[in-house]
Every structure is written in structure tokens, then in C-alpha cells.
Image: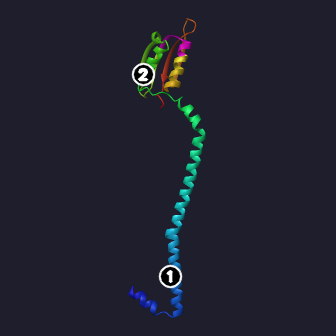
Amino acid sequence: MNKLRAWYASLEPREQRVVGIGAVIFGLLILLGAILLPLESALSSSIKGLETRREDLAWMRMNAPEVQVLGSQLPADTGEAPVVLVDRVAREAGLASALRGTQPSATGGVRVQVEGAAFDAMVTWLDTLDRRYGLAIDSITVDRTPAPGMVNASISFTAPRH
């Protein structure tokens, strides 16, 4: 630091003023570049984030009734294993005597064999599993039987979507 003072003292008064003004300008540039610009950038991004959050809140308030209605239509999580759920809902739909086999698949879904089931009851059962419990059909093969309105089916369901 002493060498710097000695060098400054060796300059002529006019040179000392130029160096002094240059030092002040250099200090202001450092202040501007290192402190004020990053601070302004952070403030600007905070303001943008606040505006976005306000827009999101306004959208949520405007769409809340629709979200509440649609939320009540989400599949129910009964906590039952899919294989148990499929069997229980089939029995509730009046298909107990038509069930020939229900087994879990490796992917978390269920495979079901149905013989001699009323087609209308089976379609209602499949719709209930999909809409109320989130079990969608992965694949299905339906064959008619000699009896009118009765079918045999092999159905694979995907894992429930929650």
C-alpha cells in the first residue's frame, strides 16, 4: 500500500486528479456491476413470479367449481387389491356365477375369465370398474354363446390409476 501511495505522490497534480477520477469511476462501476445489477435482476424476477402467482390464483378461483365437480368423479381408492376389487364388483353386478377365474397379472392388473354372463350386466360391470375404481381394460375378447344375450369373455385390466 505504501508503494501505491508513493507512486501517487510522485504524480503531477493534474495526473493525480485523472487517477482519482478514474478510481472513483472504477469504484462506481464495481458497485453497479457487482451489487446493483444483480439486485435489480433478482427484484425483477421476484415481481414476475408474483404476477404469475396472482394469475394462477385468479385462474384457480375462477375454475374452482369445475375442479370440485371433476374431483368427485375421480376413481375411488378402496385399498383393495385389484383382483379382490374385480371379484367383489362382479358379484355386486350379478356376475358371481359367470366368473371362472380371476388372477393378478405381473404388471399390477388383473386377468378375468367370464363364461355365460349377461352382456348388459358385463358392460355395466366393466363401466363401473373403469369409472369408479380406475381399472381400465387393457385387452378383451368376447364370444357369443348359443343363449341370446349371453357371452364368454377374457379380460385383462390395467393397474388402477390414482
Colour mapping: rainbow
Q: Residue drawn 52% across and 90% down?
A: 15
Q: Which residue is mark 2?
A: 83
Q: CA distance from mark 1 to mark 2?
A: 80 Å
Q: Along the horizontal axis of the image, is 55 left or right of 77?
A: right
Image position of 88 (left or right of 47): left
User: What's the residue type where badge 2 is placed?
Assistant: Val
Element assignment for label 2: helix
The answer to whether 18 is drawn above or below residue 117 in the figure is below
Q: Which residues are magenta?
A: 114-122
Decide: few, some or many residues near mark 2? Use Cα within 10 Å; few <14, some 14-19, many ≥20: some
- Identify the residue at horizontal 54%, vertical 58% (top origin): 45
Q: How many residues crowd around disc 1 within 10 Å: few (fewer than 14), some, or many (20 or more)?
A: few
Q: Is residue 22 magenta?
A: no
- For the question of whether residue 137 can be seen, the reply is no
Q: What element does badge 1 sit on? A: helix
| Residue 47 percent coordinates (x, y) | 56, 57
Instruction: Find residue 1 and report its horizontal and vertical position in percent.
Output: 39, 85
Residue topped by disc 1 = 23
**Depth order, front residue of 25/66:** 66
- Can you say whether 14 is above or below 90 in the image? below
**Amino acid type, residue under disc 1 in the picture:** Ala
Residue 140: x, y in percent?
52, 20
x and y percentages locating residue 22 in the rendered image = 53, 82
Against 159, residue 100 (above or below) is: above
